[in-house]
Structure formats: structure tokens, C-alpha cells
Image: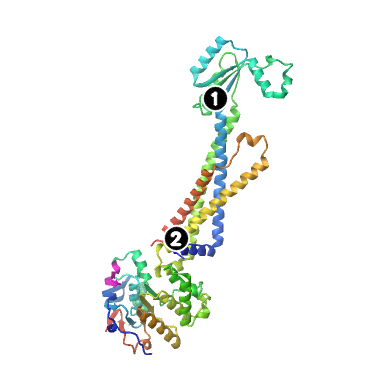
Amino acid sequence: MTSTFKIAEDLEESRPIVEAVKVTKVYTPDVVALQDVSFRINKGEVVFLTGMSGAGKTTLLKLIYCLEMPTKGLIEVNGRDLSKITSAGIQRLRQTIGVAYQDFRVLPKVTVFQNIAMAMEVLYKEPKEIKSRINELLDMLNLLEKRHTPAGKLSRGEQQRVAIARAAANKPQLLIADEPTGNLDKTISARVMELFKQLNESGTTVIIATHDETIFKDSKNMVLDLHHGQLSF
Amino acid sequence: MGQFGYIVKQAARNISHTWSTQLMTLLTVSLAVLIFSFFFLVYTNMLKAGARLDDDLRIIIYLENEIVPEMQKQMRKKIKDYGEVEKIVFISKQDAFERLSRQLGNDRDVLNDLGPSFLPPSIEVYPEKNLKTLTQIKEFSDFLATLPGASKVQYGHNWMERLGYFTKLLRIIVMLSGALLLLTTVFIVSYTIRLTVVARHEEIEILRLLGANNAYIQGPLFIEGFLQGFLGTSIGIFSLYLLYHWIKSRFSGPDILNIFEFSFFPPSITFLIICTGLILCSGGSLLSIRKYLRI
Ligand SMILES: Nc1ncnc2c1ncn2[C@@H]1O[C@H](COP(=O)(O)OP(=O)(O)O)[C@@H](O)[C@H]1O
Ligand SMILES: [Mg+2]
């Protein structure tokens, strides 16, 4: 699959949206998930985060949206030092980030529509806007017929798309997708990548964690390759 | 739809999800308010009745013989030496007879054959208002019984004593039912809110990840407690009002209840009870929010 994402050098404005300096994460008691990781992601970029299972991809993403704190090192998102962030700051930060979690985190008893709407309601968007945006996303991801089905009744691949739609709903500044194509077949994967491309064209920075080589092997985008918690360029 | 609209919508959603528990809570709160305000209503009416009785509290000393004016002066001094007295009235046989015939009105004919001699003369002593407790009144009347020529002293003590005990008992019941009200509202409401928090646990976690602010997460829970307080207290008070009217219409008659002039709470007290219920229930939900929704 060939990617046509813009590459960082093309962008006039290259301020960092995520910057990590010597970040180490140790889970108690002694699991070293990340070690001395440093990188910089500029606004408007598309970045692939790769590595084998257990390499530390999910952990790195969690640090960015403040679900985990680094054991050592500095991490800044949008110029904000996350070690000094308040709980209100975390709320504001998360409002600008859309995350498609590896484990989806959809509410099983709630409809597909409502699962996605939650992300927009939190920002107090108008019901009309919510409806049209969700229909647009569901159409793109081939889920329109399932919009009133409880998410728990869906297959894993469908749940994954609900999680992706929710992450994309607010057209966030930063979109994080953790193994977004893990449960999807080729055609649907292509649609998901198309959605990410559209978002990126409208200004969203996209970080995709994946071990699926096919979605990034031919692209000119930045690739962060993790090996046992360390970056190798 | 503004921020407040969403919070209200969310609250409605929560309530509809756990509606059976919500209903039980509402009933419990209403019942607690009804029980408390019922006893409180009886108590306030009792106090009013007591105050009315106190107002025309007098001790009557029936005498064996009429007292001549010089003796009256002496008596007056003796009584005033013992305790503070608002007023002392000497009633001669003639006075008593006239009073009785006035009271009889059109039936006064029955007295025609009798004449004033069959009624005993008496002294009516109106003690100072500060002479409040029953023991003080009892002591005073015991003293009055020792006056020369006194045959019998009367102050309706049985009636007063019973009212006094009853009022004391009621005060305890009011306090107990107040404690019940406090416990049920605060704990039942906080327990119900806790259930909502547990039921929404997964959802709240996701809302946090989506960047929901505190108002968005806590607001609906607070509204839930507030609504329970408002509806529960209002239903409780309204039921009491219906009960009051029912009792009044069933047992109304010129006799019993009119002595007491049983009346409902004035609007200010009604308002105060509703506010108290509101504050207690909101407090209960705050308690739960603080305990189970630490941010
Ligand atoms: N909450 C946790 N507690 C302890 N160890 C964890 C936790 N989360 C992840 N790990 C460990 O950290 C390492 C990196 O995990 P993860 O970031 O999930 O990797 P990846 O997403 O690349 O598969 C793994 O060895 C994993 O077992
Ligand atoms: Mg992972």
C-alpha cells in the first residue's frame, strides 16, 4: 500500500507537538518498558511507531495522553511539560487528542452511535453537528447499518472501527491509533488509512502504532522503531 | 444545547438506567420527610396549645366563707409575699352567681330557685408568666391550700401535667425522627449515587480519557441528589398536607380539635423543610462524589 502522506519537510511550520527527551518508563517492580527514548514529532506529521509486541509502543502512547507518567526524562505535548500538568490540564490536553485504543474501550451496552457521540458531547458539540459527523464517519468505515447496534454485539473488527471513529470524531489536533488495523481486512484497512490521510490533510498530526509492515513500508513518513523499549533509527 | 443542557441530559440518562433504585430512594426520602414533619407538626401544635393554656393559667382557691374587705388586704399580702403574681381577683358568692348566669345565657332560668348562696366564694390567682414549670405551679398551689379558710385549690393540673408529659415525649420523637431523616436522606442518597457511580464506572473512565471536565462527570450526579431531595421532600410534605386535610375533615366538629386549633405549617416552615431536605440530599450526593470520584 502506497502512502501519500505529506512529509515533515514539506511543512513550513514545524513546531513540535510531541517532544520526548531521555524518557524511561519502569513498571513496578522492574519491567523496563521504555529506556532513554528521545524523539520529536512536529505538527502535521504522520508517524509510524513500530516494533514487536511488548516493545513498548502502547506505553509510549500512554505517556503522551497522560495515562502513565514517565519514571525518568521529559515529555512535552503542545509545549506543555507533562510532569507539571494539573488534572484540569490533563482534561484540556485530552480534549485535543483523539485516541483509538488497542483494547478499543467501547461501552458494550451502548450503541455504536452513542459510543462515538460521547467524545463530541464531552466538548459540548451541537446534536446536529454530532449526528452529521458520526454518519459521515460510519459511512466511511462501512458501519452505517450498525449505528443503532450495541457495541458489544459487534465483531472485534467492527469494534475497532468504532474506536477509530470515536478518536477521529472531533478532528483532533493529535490522533493516536494503537494497532488500528490489527483486526481489519485489507479493504477496510485501506479505508481507515484514507480517513487518517483526510484528517492529516486538515491539520491533524497522526501517530500510528503498528507491527503491520504493509501499512508503512513504502511511505516516506517518519518511522520510530522500538526494540525492547529503545529506539533504533 | 449548552453545557447545562448536556449535564441535565446525562442526569436523566443515569436516572433512567437505575430507575428502580431511584424510585426506592425517592420513596424512602419522602417517607422520612413525612414521618418527621408529621411529628414536628403535632409538636408545634402542642406547643401552641400549651402556650394558650399558660396564658389563661389561673389557680382557683375555693373558700368556706366570704372574706371581708380587710381580710382581703391581708390575703393579698400573704399571697404576694410567697410569689410574684400578676393579679388576684376575689369572687364573692354574688359574683360567682352572676358569672354562672351569664355563662348559661338563655338557660339562666334554672338558677331562679337557687339564689347565690349555693356557690362557694373563691380567690382567683393569676401567677406571673415566669412561673412556668409544673412543679413551681404545684408548689404554689400547695401553699395556697394552707391559707386560712381555703377549702380546695384547683388549677387543672391533671390536664396540664398530661400535656406537659406528652409534649416532652413528642420532643423526643421529633428528635428521633429528625435523626432518622438525617440518616436516611444523607446515606440513602449517597448510597444511590454510589450505585450510579459503580454502574457508570466504565463510562466514567472513558469520559476521563475523552477529556470530560469535572462539571461534566460530577454535575449529573449532583443533580441526581438534588432532584431526589427536591422531589422526595416535596412529596413528603404534600402527603402530610393531604393527611392533615383528611384528618381535619374526618374529625372536625366543634369539640376536640377546635380546642387545639390544629393548623398546618406556615409557608415559611414548609419552605424551610423543603430546603433542609434539598441540602441533606445534595450533601449526600456530594459525599459520594468526593468519596468515589476523586479526580
Ligand atoms: N501496566 C503494566 N504493568 C506492568 N508491566 C506492563 C504494564 N503495561 C505494559 N507492561 C509491560 O511493558 C512492556 C511493554 O508493553 P507495551 O507497551 O504494551 O508493548 P507493545 O504495545 O509494544 O506491545 C511489556 O513487557 C509489558 O508486559
Ligand atoms: Mg500495544
**Residue B17: percent from the left, percent from the top?**
53, 65
CA gap between label 1 and label 2 equals 60 Å
Q: From the viewer's perspective, is B10 left or right of B119?
A: left
Q: From the viewer's perspective, is A110 left or right of A74?
A: right
What amino acid is at disc 2? Gly
Q: How many labels does the image show?
A: 2
Subunit ID for the residue under disc 2 = B
The relative height of residue A155 versus residue A77 in the rendered view (above or below) is below
**Residue B1: percent from the left, percent from the top?**
47, 66
Secondary-structure class at tag 2: helix
Most common SS among magenta residues: strand
Q: From the viewer's perspective, is B77 left or right of B112?
A: left
Q: In which quarter of the image is ligand 2?
A: bottom left
Q: Residue at position x 62%, y 46% from top? A: B243
Subunit ID for the residue under disc 1 = B
Q: Say which residue label 1 marks.
A: B138
What amino acid is at disc 1? Lys
Q: Which mark is residue B219?
A: 2
- The C terminus of chain B lies in which quarter of the figure? bottom left
Q: What stretch is highlighted in magenta?
A: A71-83
